């Protein structure tokens, strides 16, 4: 290699080194100027699910003339849970049915009910609904409880009535189930006609959401 070529190569390498180090310094300066962007953790709102929503709930009711059925359906809709209607094998229609029902309730008699569809032992909470009969629970609800008492884990009660007897009815149900209800609700027949019961149901469902079955 001739001398001039060697000098040329040396100068080229030197120039390259100068350019690379200049670039490195510039990059370093820029990094100093621009502070690292703060990475803000995204705020994630964790909404606590009501305990009752996580647990399995079943609404069980008897209704002779439709009042208790309306309330039961409203509760089941609000909770998006299963529902079971107790079907009495005894004809309770008309005036004679009314009188027989009053007598059966006062004597705390049992009746025949059709086979149930939902096994209560598979549920964490059973919400029992009954019409008030002579200040007691109705005979079909008493029968359901007597047949399934051992399968009830946690209970809540509601009743519909003309005007009085709800407190005694809840005591009757507490004695029959052997369990304290997580919540109770009374709805008057006149409230059902005006759809006023919907606000009561909302309150009842909220109260149930606060208890851990
Ligand atoms: C035999 C019988 C006894 C009743 N006893 C009472 C009572 O003690 N107090 C009351 O307020 N209403 C009483 N009622 C009225 C019912 O509780 C009320 O109309 C209820 O909403 C009916 O519900 P259902 O339509 O689901 O059958 C009685 C009704 C019947 C058939």
Image (cartoon, grey):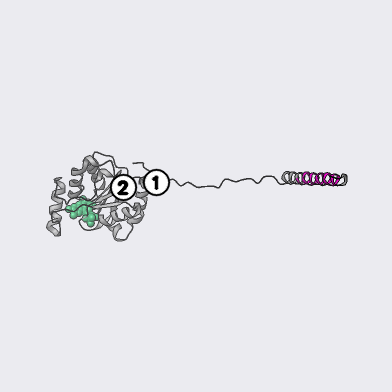
- Residue lying at the far front in this picture: please name it: 1
Q: In terms of secondary structure, where does tag 1 sit?
A: loop
Q: In the image, 19: left or right of 173?
A: right
Location of residue 112 in the rendering, given as x and y in whole percent from the top left corner = 14, 50
Location of residue 115 in the rendering, given as x and y in whole percent from the top left corner = 18, 50
The residue lying at 28 percent from left, 48 percent from top is 58
Q: In the image, 193: left or right of 209?
A: left
The residue lying at 25 percent from left, 56 percent from top is 69
Q: Main secondary structure of the magenta part?
A: helix
Q: Nearer the viewer, residue 153 or 175?
A: 153
Location of residue 135 in the rendering, given as x and y in whole percent from the top left corner = 21, 48
171 in relation to 72, above or below = above
Residue that badge 2 annotates: 57
Spatial CA distance of label 1 from label 2 is: 12 Å
Q: In terms of secondary structure, where does tag 2 sit?
A: strand
Q: Nearer the viewer, residue 77 or 177?
A: 77
Q: Nearer the viewer, residue 46 or 110?
A: 46
The residue lying at 35 percent from left, 54 percent from top is 78
The label number, if any, that marks residue 50 in the structure image: 1
Q: Is residue 12 magenta?
A: yes
Around disc 1, counting alpha carbons within 10 Å, would you say few (fewer than 14), some (14 to 19), or many (20 or more)? some
Q: Nearer the viewer, residue 62 or 84?
A: 84
The label number, if any, that marks residue 141 in the structure image: none
Q: Which residues are magenta?
A: 5-23
Q: Is residue 21 magenta?
A: yes
Q: Quadrant of the N terminus?
A: top right
* Mark toward the start of the polypeptide (1 vs 2): 1
């Amino acid at each position: 290699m001739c001398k001039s070529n060697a000098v040329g190569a040396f100068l080229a390498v030197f120039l390259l080194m100068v350019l690379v180090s200049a670039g490195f310094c510039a990059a370093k300066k820029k990094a100093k100027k621009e502070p690292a962007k703060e990475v803000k953790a995204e705020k994630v709102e964790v909404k606590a699910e009501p305990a009752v929503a996580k647990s399995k709930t079943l609404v069980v009711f008897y209704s002779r003339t439709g009042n208790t059925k309306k309330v039961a359906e409203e509760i089941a809709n609000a909770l998006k849970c299963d529902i079971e209607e107790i079907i009495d094998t005894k004809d309770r229609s008309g005036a004679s049915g009314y009188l027989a029902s009053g007598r059966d309730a006062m004597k705390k008699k049992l009746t025949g009910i059709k086979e149930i569809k939902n096994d209560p032992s598979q549920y964490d909470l059973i919400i029992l609904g009954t019409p008030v009969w002579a200040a007691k629970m109705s005979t079909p609800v008493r029968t359901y409880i007597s047949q399934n008492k051992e399968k009830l884990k946690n209970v809540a009660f509601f009743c519909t009535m003309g005007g009085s007897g709800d407190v005694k009815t809840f005591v009757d149900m507490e004695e029959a189930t052997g369990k304290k209800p997580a919540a109770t609700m009374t709805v008057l027949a006149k409230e059902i006609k005006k759809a006023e019961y919907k606000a009561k149901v909302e309150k009842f469902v909220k109260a149930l959401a606060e208890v851990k079955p």
